[in-house]
Image (tube, grey):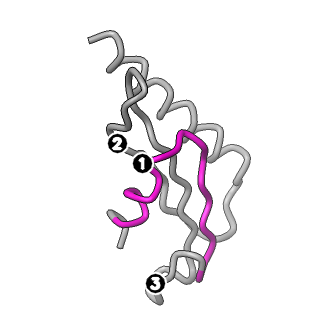
Amino acid sequence: VLLRLLDQSLATSQVMVRIGNETQHEGLIGTSVVTSGYGARGAALGAVGVLGPRRMDYAHTMARVAAVANYVGELLAER
């Protein structure tokens, strides 16, 4: 389930947030998933994300996920 959610983030560098039943999996109803894709030279290579409680600091988590995805993309572009 988590791999499917990360896979959906591959195509965009925008941060995606899914809360509760938006994950479309009964076992994740009490959680939230914040993800973002990353890549190098215009190619999508992977995604990072955070799985946490529904009552999380979304602004902070979204900023951190975006920062990590950007950092990983920059590291890959240098190589």
Q: How far apart are marks 2 and 1 (CA)?
A: 6 Å
Q: Nearer the viewer, residue 7 or 30?
A: 7
Circle on res. 51: none
Q: Is residue 64 magenta?
A: no
Asked if 38 appears above or below 55 in the picture, the reply is above
What residue range appears in magenta?
Answer: 4-21
Q: Residue 38 in the image: x percent, y percent?
A: 43, 35
Front residue of this view, candidates 79 and 32: 79
- Going by the numbered disc 1, the residue's amino acid type is Leu
Which residue corresponds to mark 3? Answer: 25
Residue drawn at the location 59% of the way across and 83% of the way down: 21
Residue situated in front as seen by the camera: 48 or 78 = 78
Dot label at residue 46: 2
Disc assigned to residue 10: 1
Name the residue at 41% across, 25% down: 73
Q: Are marks 2 and 1 in contact (CB under 8 Å)?
A: yes
